[in-house]
Amino acid sequence: MQFDWIRLACLLAALVSHLLQSLSFTHMLQLNSYRNERFWKWCKENDKRLVSVRTLLPALCLLTLYLPETWCVAASAAILLVTALLNIPKKAKKPLVFTARVKRLLTTQYVLFIAVLVVCYFLSVTRCVGLVAALSLAVWAWTFIANTVNTPLEKAIANRYVRDAKRRLKAMPDLTVIGVTGSYGKTSTKTCLQALLSVRYNVLMTPESYNTTMGVVRTIRERLQPSHEIFIAEMGAKNSGDIQEICELVEPTYGVITSVGEQHLETFKTVETIVATKFELADALPADGRLFVNGDNELIRDRLAETAPLCPVTTYGLTVGDVTVTDVQVSNNGTTFTVAAGEETQTFVTHLLGAHAIQNLAGCIAVAVSLGIPLAELTYPVRRLKPIEHRLQLLPNGFIDDAYNSNPAGFRSALDVLSNFDTQRVLVTPGMVELGERGDALNEELGAYAADKCDIAVLVGLKQAPPLQKGLLSAGFDETNLYVVATLKEGLALLNTIAAPNGRIVLLENDLPDNF
């Protein structure tokens, strides 16, 4: 067989097209925690991304089979190059992170695809073009297959990293480990707790949203030093057993449960399962440890009434608790409140906004007091606290950025904050996701709750908007002040066309990730 440069060019075009499309699908797999079942579910729910002009273009290669062989291959190469150009990954809110695992995954995909292309080179022109076209129509499947192939290797690598992390922890027997979990408020609580405890201790916390087993492992292996006295591990979960797995790794002495509510119902299915999963932290604490819980949360109170943990329990909150908050005053500059812990009372000032933020802060104060730091010593670090990015963050441009995530309690708290302003109050939101069958009902309830908290509502996303819209209108919201837009960009542009003679405050509540 004579060397065929045109055929080779066609196969290279197919490879380039595959490379660019595979980046997008690998990104979606990463956002779905490398779980094949979640990725498969995403594929079924986002069929328009899989079946579109951009992805179906390789099917035109089949029409070239009626051309002379040289023209057939050349035309197919051109079609595949156009496919590649149309599938250059767009800028994402949370870009694909090229971790070692992603690099291994992409390598496996490309090796498998190149192996098939080598076979295609030695086939007849019609079979070569036909097979290349078929392969290029289902790039998502290659991502799925490569992830399946790599699963045993990834498990072996993960187990080695876990063993190394356990070894490092055992080498520091005096290290105090604090686990933080909850349906919401984990990251905010962890960050505030680190700031408060740092007035006396050398504290390490898991960064950002490193709240999975491997995220905690990575923190230990890369950041834990012999000089650290306290390690705060955020513990996230989307399935039963997730928190137990992290506890088996770090063996916490103290635990904080910030909240329990209807979040991630898509995977947990029931609230009872959520409660049981969050209390895996309580079950892991030793008898000489201590559990700190949000006493305002009814589900937490009910669980404690049913099953008390082996260790002592400290409750905190705005209404009931061993550590309670009173006299909460909110203004444009932040929040003033008073904390009572035992016989001590102290007034605090913070830049944080929202009832749930003060609840979380009360929990941090409770932990700090338990570790020997008096209330008076905490006033300065509390005053210095800054809102965590995208979590009820009051910006200079008149926006309240609460875009990181959304849940029923946090959404209500954000709306309460919005209602305190005396300018034009605008809500911009796509609603809440990952709520399973309860999604529409909960969004409708929040729409009704928002009706008297805002003057203008901009609902983002044609798919998510209907239940929010229904709730707003059922509660008597003025339909002329209700707008539905396809994208956040479109919604922000719309605001520029609406007059605000007395000023405006805009609440950005939730910003859906790239896989929605």
Image (cartoon, rainbow, N blue to C red):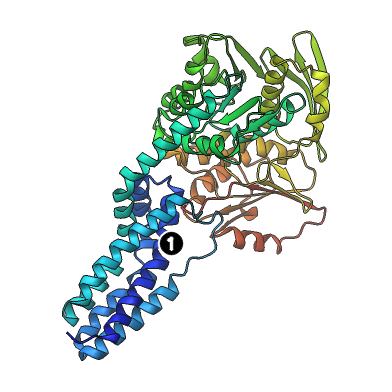
Residue 280, percent across and down?
46, 21
Residue at 45%, 33% (x, y): give it. Answer: 162
Element marked by disc 1: helix
Q: Residue at coordinates 47% horizontally, 16% vertically from top-left?
A: 283
Tell me, yes or no, if residue 62 can be seen here.
Answer: yes
* Residue 383 pos. (x, y %): 81, 32
- Please provide percent x and percent y for residue 313: 59, 12
Mark 1: give few (<14), some (14-19) or many (20+) Cα within 10 Å. many
- For the residue pair 457 and 173, the one nearer the viewer reads as 173
Q: Amino acid at mark 1?
A: Leu
Residue that carries the numbered disc 1 in the rendered image: 23
Q: Nearer the viewer, residue 191 or 277?
A: 191
Left or right of 253: which side holds 380? right
Q: Hey, which quadrant is residue 190 in on the image?
A: top right
Q: Does residue 3 lie above or below 205 as drawn? A: below
Which quarter of the rendered picture does the N terminus lie within? bottom left
The reply, left or right, for residue 74 in relation to residue 298 is left
Would you identify the image quadrant in which residue 239 lies?
A: top left
**Does 64 sit above or below residue 347?**
below
Is the residue 221 above or below the residue 129 in the image? above
Horizontal side of residue 62 vs 255, given as left or right: left
Q: Residue at x 78, y 30 (%)?
A: 382
For this rendering, which residue is in front, 444 or 98? 98
